[in-house]
Amino acid sequence: MHRRSLFCLILFYIGCMSACLSSAHAEKQTTQKTPSAPIRVSTVIGGHIHPALCRAANGDLLAVYNENGGGGKELLISRSTDGGLHWSTSKPIPTIKDCSIYPGSLTTLKNGEIVLHWSCYRVEGDRRWRVPQFCTSKDHGITWSPVTEIPLVDLTNYTCLRHPILELDADRWVCPFYDRTVIYHRKTNSVYPFGDGRNHGMVPLVQTADGIFISGAPQASSPVPVGKPGQMVYGLRSTDQGKSWQALNNLPYFGVAGYDLTVLKNGTLVLTSILYGVGRDDEWAFELTLSHDQGKTWDKTNSVIIFNPGRPVKGRGWPRTVQIDAQTLGTLFFDLDPKQDGGPGVFFVRTPLAAFQPSLKD
């Protein structure tokens, strides 16, 4: 009996220790208040890597990018099933053929379908233009539909987008191309103007839970490709489906790589912006800032820098952010610095919402 009692006591002690360790691990996970170190998704070569990111309906994270940009022949996809901690070996998306690719964006629709956009470079003599295309996946990015070409006329070398589409309903998608902002009607495969017809440029367009549209447009109407700045608005806001817009006057400088906007499930907006060098157009760091009032103000006091290598980010980075779960954000970007450990690559940073103060409620 004494031996059996001792054995039971040992088992009880082991059980208690395991419970304590599990509790401590869980507490560490929930109280983590700093962004993770950059996690390498893949090694790349150079050029327009321009990664896109989405969270699939099953919780997987998908990253799509060029390995060697400037007209790469394939888009590669990598998957994470554990919130961005580990990523699968990248594979080409097989339906894209006969295309010199400029990368686009990933969007998860309300029904769980995923839309992948890109543009194909075209050259004929002195004329250069890009053709916007997309394909979709109904199985969380495992297989993809045949390619669909968006039926635009007067294509230019700036008919391209780098941000997710804005889903108005099952058939209507707002596409913020660089040279025009239009609605694509999927059922009829047709295109018509969005809202008041202005060009927002190649910027993020999002809709809050209350139906308010937020545009990342730095100007009231975007010139193409560049030109003398017009009326500066530093963001736009619409409460009538884009028929009229009010200047936000609170978004930061919009450089070559721009910035990203993300709507969280609790209604909070996330601005993913780039910190530039003083007097030079170099990207030095990436920062996340929250808005709790649908973009009217931004909590800059509690912004979180998620990547700061202490040198310019080579290739401009093009950071993209999604919500991983109720406690965590994830940001994808690239850095072509050859001197960093492992060389040029695509990277992912996990940022706990606890990093922002005051802390958010789920």
Image (tube, grey):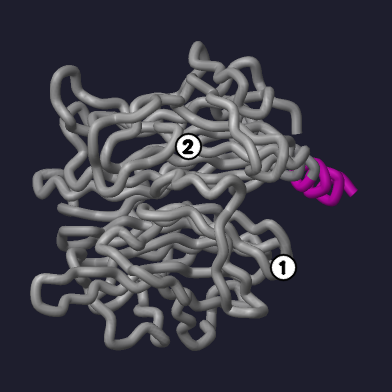
The magenta-colored residue range is: 1-11
Query: Badge 2: few (under 14), some or many (20 or more) residues near its Cα, within 10 Å?
Result: many
In space, the residues marked 2 and 1 are separated at their CA atoms by 24 Å
Q: Is residue 324 above or below residue 48?
A: above
Q: Is residue 76 above or below residue 354?
A: below
Picture residue at 72% right of the left edge, 62% below the top: 169
Task: Give the camera-side residue of 304 and 164.
Answer: 164
- Residue 56 lies in quadrant: bottom right
Q: Give the prevailing secondary structure in the magenta stretch.
A: helix
Query: Badge 1: few (under 14), some or many (20 or more) residues near its Cα, within 10 Å?
Result: few
Secondary structure under the numbered disc 2 in the rendered image: loop
Q: Which residue is mark 1?
A: 170
Q: Is residue 237 above or below residue 337?
A: above
Please provide percent x and percent y for residue 274. 33, 32
Picture residue at 30% right of the left edge, 26% below the top: 275
Q: Earlier in the sequence, mark 2 or mark 1?
A: 1
Picture residue at 53% right of the left edge, 38% below the top: 215
**Residue 8 located within the stretch drawn in magenta:** yes
Q: Which residue is mark 2?
A: 216
